[in-house]
Image: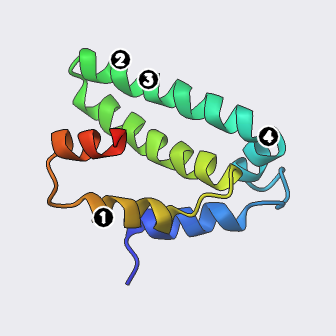
Amino acid sequence: MPNVLTRLAHTIESRLGADEKKSYAAKLFARGPEKCAEKFGEEAIEAIIAAVKNDKKNLTEEAADVLFHLCVMLSSRGVKFENVLAELERREGTSGIIEKENRKK
């Protein structure tokens, strides 16, 4: 059974080419992948600000926005959310330091 993030990613993918008047994701897609990336960045900055201010409620809300806009950005460039999950699974159990060093090789 897919988790909420996988379901969200599939819903967002289904909005590609949908009616912009009925879907916020479709509206973002219509503005192009660059705008999707820009919007993701804006949401990430808002999450950072909430974290710096130690505003847990706002950080929770902004983190949800970040995840939503990450899925939009990925879909706008044809990257499947399942591929991101597979990459995380591949890295699971490996120290971040070692994983980063292995990318340099």
Image quadrant occupied by the N terminus? bottom left
Residue on which the image places disc 2: 49
Query: Could you tell whether 52 is left or right of 76 in the image?
Result: left
* x, y percent for residue 76: 70, 50
Of badges 3 and 4, nearer the viewer stands: 4
**What whole-number distance in Å separates the C-alpha atoms at marks 4 and 1?**
30 Å
Residue on which the image places disc 3: 46
- Whether label 3 touches label 2, CB < 8 Å: yes
Front in this rendered view, residue 71 or 47: 71
Give the mark nearest the N terminus, 1 or 3.
3
Residue on which the image places disc 1: 90
Q: Please, what secondary structure does the residue beneath circle 4 have?
A: loop
Q: Crowding at label 4, few (<14), some or many (≥20) Cα neighbours within 10 Å? A: few
Of badges 1 and 3, nearer the viewer stands: 1
**Is 86 located above or below residue 58 in the figure?**
below
Q: Please, what secondary structure does the residue beneath circle 2 have?
A: helix
Image quadrant occupied by the C terminus? top left
**Is 104 located above or below residue 22 in the figure?**
above
Give the mark nearest the N terminus, 1 or 2.
2
**Residue at image point 25% right, 24% down:** 55
- Whether label 3 touches label 4, CB < 8 Å: no
Query: Could you tell whether 29 is left or right of 89 in the image?
Result: right
**What whole-number distance in Å separates the C-alpha atoms at marks 1 and 3?**
30 Å
**Which mark is on residue 32?**
4
When asked about the image quadrant of residue 13, the answer is bottom right
- Whether label 1 touches label 3, CB < 8 Å: no
Q: Please, what secondary structure does the residue beneath circle 1 have?
A: helix
Give the mark nearest the N terminus, 3 or 4.
4
Q: Amino acid at mark 3?
A: Glu
**Residue at image point 35% right, 38% down:** 104
Front in this rendered view, residue 5 or 54: 5
- Whether label 4 touches label 1, CB < 8 Å: no
